Image: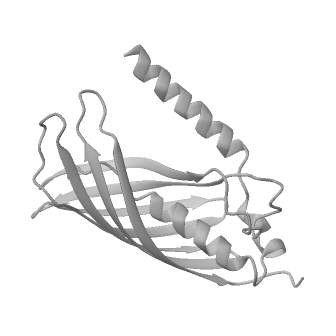
Amino acid sequence: MKKILFIFTFILCVSAAYASQEYKFDNFSQNVTKENLPYFTKDIGGLLGSGTFTTGRILGWGGFQLSARGAVMPKPSEKNTALGSKDDAKAIVMPWIQGEIGLPFRLDGFIRASSWDGLTIAGGGLKWGVTRPTDTLYSIQPMIVVLAQSGVHQDFSLTQYSADLVFSLKLPYVVPYIGGGVDHTKVTVQSATTH
């Protein structure tokens, strides 16, 4: 139990350190150009899409879950200077609240929302447990996740669609997971300072 508490505390401290060194979306209008916009789009899409990963276990019919979640991109791509100089090397952070409900046929529906640093995002999607849930040790649980979400900031708006495949492994005390996905993200600039 002490090891679990130590690991949880360590992760919390590292997350707080990254959050204190984050980029601010308020710098977008001063820094965005035609050259760095595709890299910003790729990074923000990857950040939002990565937040769909979870264990492969479904909630089941009638199940409900409400959770606080988030994603951190420790170091954006080198050519993404839309939020500031590449020499700053800060993280991009996005927390949100997510509500899930279990549906029939191994489906879970979810909605999510966030308002962070002037960027408001809302969306939802479905999770499908490919195999029936099991509590057998060392069993693999695959899950397919699809998501659509939109966001708005005073300087830009975004739309993102994501599809992911996640595998989790039931171990005695933890359930690690790994996944991969694809996303399509579109960012529309509302206002920018001319360079």
21 or 184: nearer the viewer: 184
Q: How is the image coloured?
A: one colour
Query: Which quadrant holds the N terminus?
Result: top left
Q: Is residue 188 left or right of residue 180?
A: right
Q: Is residue 30 left or right of residue 58?
A: right
- The vertical placement of 104 against 5, above or below, is below
- The vertical placement of 57 against 109, above or below, is above
Q: In terms of image quadrants, where is residue 138?
A: top left
Q: Is residue 153 visible?
A: no
Percent of width and height locating residue 143:
24, 58
Who's the residue at 18% across and 51% down the image? 63
Percent of width and height locating residue 87:
84, 56
- The vertical placement of 191 against 153, above or below, is below
Percent of width and height locating residue 13:
60, 31
Percent of width and height locating residue 155:
71, 77
Q: Hey, which residue is sitting farthest top in the picture?
A: 2
Q: Is residue 98 visible?
A: yes
Query: Which quadrant holds the C terminus?
Result: bottom right
Q: Is residue 193 left or right of residue 92?
A: right
Who's the residue at 75% across and 84% down the image? 34
176 or 147: nearer the viewer: 176
Who's the residue at 28% across and 27% down the image? 173
Who's the residue at 83% across and 62% down the image? 85
